[in-house]
Amino acid sequence: MPDQFVSTTPLDPRARPLVDQLTQEYVTRYGSYFGDPPGAEMTRYPPEVFAAPDGHFLLLLRDGVAIAGGAFKRLDARTAELKRVWTDTAFRRQGLARRVVAELEVQAVRQGYGRAYLTTGFRQPEAKGLYLGLGYTPLFDLDVDPETYGILPFEKALPGAALTQTGPQRTAA
């Protein structure tokens, strides 16, 4: 069975192993470096912000098991903020994160966004490399020690987005 994207919520039980791994990664790499309790980033947003019409949460399944995933939430009227992009540690180096980001970008355009924004931490050089490789523009000086910034922001105009987009399309109930 080929890999399959599934739109769901962060509360989906299939997402739990990925969320747990990502939380552990934040705890290991950052601890309380940013002043919050270790792993606090994972509880910063309620699950509803990753739901339509403003957000989206997806998993990449292989044989029914989540091997990668990611989400976006509304940053502003035309910008989707990517969050929680993660690949199960047992499935790294297969291009799965690239596939997740590409799928999130397509879905963001479907939902009316014209720009993607994201941040990663300075202790995640593989994420920094991923986003640079996917055409994201760093909103920081690449020649400065990343720890100077702590948080590394990126942006990208979304391919296929209409230039006149004003934000997520809403339909009357």
Image: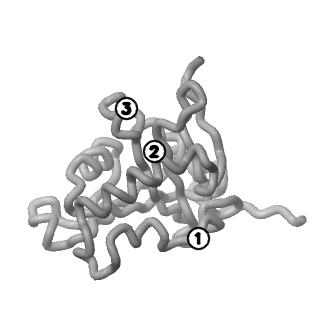
Quadrant of res 120:
bottom left
Amino acid type, label 2: Val
Q: Which of pointers 3 and 2 lies earlier in the amino acid sequence? A: 3
Element at badge 2? helix
Above or below: residue 13 compared with residue 31: above
* Quadrant for the C terminus in the image: bottom right
Element at badge 3? helix
Tell me, yes or no, if residue 167 can be seen here.
no
Q: Mark 2 = which residue?
A: 101
Q: Where does residue 24 sit, x and y in percent of width and height? A: 34, 57
- Depth check, mark 3 against mark 2: the one in front is 3
Query: Who's the residue at 26% across and 52% down the image?
Result: 128
Q: Mark 1 = which residue?
A: 46
Amino acid type, label 3: Phe
Q: Are marks 3 and 1 in contact (CB under 8 Å)?
A: no
Q: Mark 3 = which residue?
A: 91
Query: Who's the residue at 70% across and 61% down the image?
Result: 53
Q: Which of pointers 3 and 1 lies earlier in the amino acid sequence? A: 1
Amino acid type, label 1: Pro
Element at badge 1? loop
Query: Who's the residue at 66% across and 54% down the image?
Result: 111
CA neighbours of label 1 inside 10 A, class few (<14), some (14 to 19), many (20+): few
Query: Who's the residue at 20% across and 72% down the image?
Result: 149
